[in-house]
Amino acid sequence: MTVSGEPRVPRTLTYAEAVNDALHVAMASDPSVICYGLGVDDPKTIFGTTKGLQTRFGDQRVFDMPTAEAAMTGVAIGAALGGMRPVMVHQRLDFFLLAMDQLVNGAAKWHYMFGGQRSVPITIRLILGRGWGQGPTHSQSLHAWFAHIPGLKVVMPTNPEDAKGLLLASIFDPNPVLFLEHRWLHNTMGSVPEGDYRIPLGKARQLREGDAVTIVSMSYMTVEALHAVDHLRQSDVHCDLLDLRTVSPLDWDAVFASVRRTGRLLVLDTAAETGSIAGEIAARAAIECWTLLKSAPQRIAMPDIPEPTSFGLTRGLHPRAEHIVAAVAALVGKQIGVDELVARRTVPHDVPGDWFKGPF
Amino acid sequence: MTVSGEPRVPRTLTYAEAVNDALHVAMASDPSVICYGLGVDDPKTIFGTTKGLQTRFGDQRVFDMPTAEAAMTGVAIGAALGGMRPVMVHQRLDFFLLAMDQLVNGAAKWHYMFGGQRSVPITIRLILGRGWGQGPTHSQSLHAWFAHIPGLKVVMPTNPEDAKGLLLASIFDPNPVLFLEHRWLHNTMGSVPEGDYRIPLGKARQLREGDAVTIVSMSYMTVEALHAVDHLRQSDVHCDLLDLRTVSPLDWDAVFASVRRTGRLLVLDTAAETGSIAGEIAARAAIECWTLLKSAPQRIAMPDIPEPTSFGLTRGLHPRAEHIVAAVAALVGKQIGVDELVARRTVPHDVPGDWFKGPF
Amino acid sequence: MRATTLETSTALEPVLARALLFQMKRIRFVEEEIARRYPEGLMRCPTHLSIGQEAVAAAVGAVLRRDDLAVGTHRAHAHYLGKGGSLRAMLAEIYGKVTGCSRGRGGSMHLIDLDVGFEGSTAIVGNSIPIGVGLALAAQLRGTDQVSCVFVGDGAIEEGVFYEAANFAVVRRLPVVFLCENNLYSVYSPLSVRQPPGRSIHGLAAAVGLATDHGDGNDVDEVYVKTAAAVGRVRAGEGPCFLEYATYRWREHCGPNYDNDIGYRTEAEYLAWRERDPVMLYERKLVAAGVFTEAGIDVMQVEIEQEVSDAFRFAEDSPFPEPAEAFEHVYC
Amino acid sequence: MRATTLETSTALEPVLARALLFQMKRIRFVEEEIARRYPEGLMRCPTHLSIGQEAVAAAVGAVLRRDDLAVGTHRAHAHYLGKGGSLRAMLAEIYGKVTGCSRGRGGSMHLIDLDVGFEGSTAIVGNSIPIGVGLALAAQLRGTDQVSCVFVGDGAIEEGVFYEAANFAVVRRLPVVFLCENNLYSVYSPLSVRQPPGRSIHGLAAAVGLATDHGDGNDVDEVYVKTAAAVGRVRAGEGPCFLEYATYRWREHCGPNYDNDIGYRTEAEYLAWRERDPVMLYERKLVAAGVFTEAGIDVMQVEIEQEVSDAFRFAEDSPFPEPAEAFEHVYC
Ligand SMILES: Cc1ncc(C[n+]2csc(CCOP(=O)(O)OP(=O)(O)O)c2C)c(N)n1
Ligand SMILES: Cc1ncc(C[n+]2csc(CCOP(=O)(O)OP(=O)(O)O)c2C)c(N)n1
Ligand SMILES: [Mg+2]
Ligand SMILES: [Mg+2]
């Protein structure tokens, strides 16, 4: 879905640049888009994602705020009712826990509880931390919470193109959207179309094709899945890799269609296992695709613990490509080595790459 | 597990009286137990559950509070760190959304993130509304949220005996416990032992035995399940009915043991379907009991919508005994009528019984 | 509580005075009628009446322009009606009918009438406060001269979100009026267990940075004059303000009954406030001033009764929404 | 910002003055050493230094009794050390070692030392405020005369939970000291985009109902005297208080570097504050007063350097926790 007629020349951008690009395009094309959050106009511009916005669009539309996550979420709701399209950002999802009443009792239900008269087109960007000592209160992935609330949409893009296309779609969606950016993705590169490029919410993207196992993934886990799937191909195991992109509404058709082909399902998640969306997908696949499944659905998620800070304690803690390979191997009943895969990794286990030097 | 040596003579109490009894016993036996929340000492004493506490234990230990759910949760955490055992209450779970930061970033993680040095023995009583116009912000069942957070325990008792035994166990548990009381249960009657009667957290209770289908349920849904199971018995379909009692930690052994016997699983939930604990149970059963299951696991939960207020809109909205019967009938491949079951219900669909006259 | 109507209040234009009295009497009658019929069990939702508090709603509603915005709380009937909200749609909503202002999804605690800028009332204490501030932000950004009125109770100001929202409104100089009805209670809790002794709410608001005023919430003239002055300043771009009016709820917190017998407040306190019934006081004042005759008031009462009974008939006669409708409008 | 040390401050006992200087110099040196070593990449967690803010931590720590309680924020090193927390355990925690005060689970932002009543610092702004109030509630209920000290920044007071917690503390007259270091910034945000112009934080706190005082946070004598007086009143049961001290963080918000070049504040502002370096000012003052000689200060410095280098060695030499430990202590 492309709205404007601008040419869409792809360029190579980082994920953070793609987010920034989407914000520029949205704000330029619609004066009702506003953008605020702690630090949007500071020298770090939220990892570069809000760069240039205040200079270009002024401090009425782009502004810093008091440390008051709850009220500022309500302000977004009210501004949206008043005709604006607020885009709010939090440097970590964890800070947004202060605003659950406004999100759930307000934003999610406004359209419903007033009989469909008003909508709340807000977009809330939440950054997911991981590793490098981010620890128990800077690393939570709570998309399962949001997906459990009727009325909310939840977007978790993996690559720069999707980050841009889905952010534009989120901003112009009439519903409240949680837009989750994994910190480990901000520096990944990819080709990104120019202009008002939108990708419909609620559609998964098939990143790899195969008939051995359906792998359903989202956000950073898809990066690990890509390594795993490409490694598995060397052993002639070909997986279907579905990157969900939107966690709510979820693209059940795509999931079930793939399971119909492969008969085997592995779901990945960045969140704690119990109560995860990976569980929801496994459950619904079992319920709806019972006769299609050749073996039990599987999931790989974070263990049910808070993320500790120490370099020592996070060693081996996060699910990675080798775990995915092992799970697929078990599903298809093969022995597949992972040494090469592991050896290829040169940066310490707690950083996404050389570019990440801390502190957050 | 009984701590004191007092005799445990059972008497018939309502669920609300059983909660009240537990609070009296806890406060009498341990001076560190304190009890607060909006209305604990008002004339309505939280549906009778806090009756007599302030008179007996004084206004230092039993007190009303400002309308400030977030801070007052933090106050409970701090008081717990200082050696108290606070029991907090909210007239609706929905109000507690204001306190998610304190609950999740504080209470749930304190023990973990400070290396196991301190525990946070708080109990938070949350009342779940339903029907009679409670509507979108007075009817939410968010136990799936809590169960997704490592470090929290979640208790959802169904009958007066369990309400008492589990509340005492919750209060004296060293971890933060969410204790969810369904408003439709407060007037149900049952035999309740006297004294310091505790039921260990994390153990399901088998309420009916049978080998046709395993029904896993919690809280008010168990009342509907009992009607259904007893009705099914007339058609010679015998179900295992497990009342979870504790949703986190969940009694997986009991669930799997029953599934091992029956090979069929139906999970009930008071919450919205997507992302529900019913889904988690279906998922884990599919993953762990694949070869034992004779057919797809099933679940019955609330539809993925906010609860509307109107008498007209809640008609047929909530899952009831007849839906459970139908699901079991489908699982075992029988035709089983539900007319008699439905006809037996004499009160309007939006109230638990004659006793409920509104307004909340 | 003051013993008499402020003598300092400006005598209002007769047309306006008439409108204020009419609105107060109308709200009173609607609420009394809800109370009378509530035990029939057809209004099946938590319902918080404003009987005793009509002066604020009537005066503020009269000050605000139709295109000004307002958000309310669980106790919103009077504010909604004062702002001009449809009576029929409100009653139908309380009856859960498809003709209700929220199509039966929200009930008494979730009122909306977009035609008159009543943008919604919500049931979670404090919840609508920042939303009202956000409406003001939108007005400021769009360059309109609309004012957003945020109705709050003395309990709601205890929520952190009030403080956060007020601070932001001051920082951005937003066109918001926080309108606090201090009725001394939050449910059954007196101020003493919730707020420091001797600390005034408007004093607190002033320290946050809001312009403030306060007055006798049972004197409709006083409320009108003070609110009009404050709203004028807000509209002129002088930044947000906070108005606190002292008043009293006559009946139980939620539901139709009197409850002075159950122990959280005294009959004497209630009677003292009842002496200062805002409707009766104003009626007497206007009759004394010759604005009305007793007969004129009777005519008014008849008009009100007709409108109200018609509206109840409308609500009762309207159909419930179809159960299938419950599945609509989850997403837009 | 004031230009000179308050002349009005009481001259403290030499023993105490020495202790204050020692603590300030010690905190300074620890923090400088962290900054120096941080680029090695072995302290892998977000780390917020207190360089420039040592006076408050040293003085408040000296006022509080060992059995008094304290909770802190993301920027807690100085408060923890001032309260008497173990340096070795703190550094080991920042290095993620099993000997860390939180066994490597919390890092720089989650410090605890129960031996000295430092009950925890947390990384969510405002999060620990009501927890500190709850500690005071427990102390009151248990009838101890402990005081609970809640360290907050100028940003944290914007969170609704501060307001809610302060209100409750006043209502119950709890033994809490809210200790606010106003360093003018929240991350890179100046006060102007967050709080109303001209509104003082201590004035706001007073309106909530707290007893308040405020002063020069770079003058350790002044902080000591004012805090001691306030804590005395709190301990005597006179209810909670709020103290605001003006000070300045020298380096970047999070991390080891200077950042006056990146544009959110000026080099001139930084240099003006640096002129008022609390450590240097006090050192000069004590030397001038004859409490110390230059040589005495050198001896002190040597002692500090030895302790600190020993503590770093301890931290570096300690093992990481075993990965399996990550699965422990989720429940108690
Ligand atoms: C967050 C939250 N906490 C508690 C409640 C329960 N509650 C409903 S109305 C009310 C009283 C609010 O008092 P006030 O703001 O003074 O309004 P009043 O009822 O006096 O008009 C309370 C506590 C709620 N609805 N939401
Ligand atoms: C709830 C929340 N919002 C935002 C942040 C990001 N953050 C970390 S420290 C900080 C600044 C707080 O400023 P202040 O209280 O003045 O303390 P200072 O850093 O100046 O010591 C912010 C906004 C956070 N950790 N938690
Ligand atoms: Mg009130
Ligand atoms: Mg600061």
Image: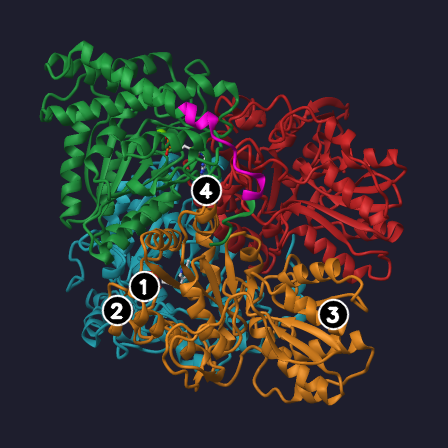
Chain colours: A orange, B red, C green, D cyan
Kindly indicate whether the residue at mark 1 contacts the one at mark 2 (C-beta within 8 angstroms): no
Looking at the image, residue C246 sits to the left or right of residue A275; the answer is: left
Predominant SS along the magenta part? helix
Q: Is residue A310 magenta?
A: no
Residue B41 place in picture, x, y as percent:
49, 26
Kindly indicate whether the residue at mark 3 contacts the one at mark 4 (C-beta within 8 angstroms): no
**Spatial distance from mark 4 to mark 2, Cα to Cα?**
47 Å
Residue that badge 1 annotates: A34
**Spatial distance from mark 1 to mark 4, Cα to Cα?**
30 Å
Q: Nearer the viewer, mark 2 or mark 1?
A: 1
Question: The N terminus of chain D is located in which quarter?
Answer: bottom left
Q: Nearer the viewer, mark 1 or mark 4?
A: 1
Q: Nearer the viewer, residue A254 or B246?
A: A254
Residue that badge 2 annotates: D283
Q: Residues within 10 Å of mark 4 (few under 14, many from 20)?
A: many
Disc 2 is placed on an element classified as helix
The relative height of residue C260 versus residue C55 in the rendered view (above or below) is: above
**Spatial distance from mark 4 to mark 3, Cα to Cα?**
48 Å
Q: Residues within 10 Å of mark 1 (few under 14, many from 20)?
A: many
**Spatial distance from mark 2 to mark 1, Cα to Cα?**
51 Å
Q: Nearer the viewer, mark 1 or mark 3?
A: 3
Q: Earlier in the sequence, mark 1 or mark 3?
A: 1
Residue that badge 3 annotates: A260
Q: Amino acid at mark 3?
A: Arg
Q: Quadrant of ligand 3?
A: top left
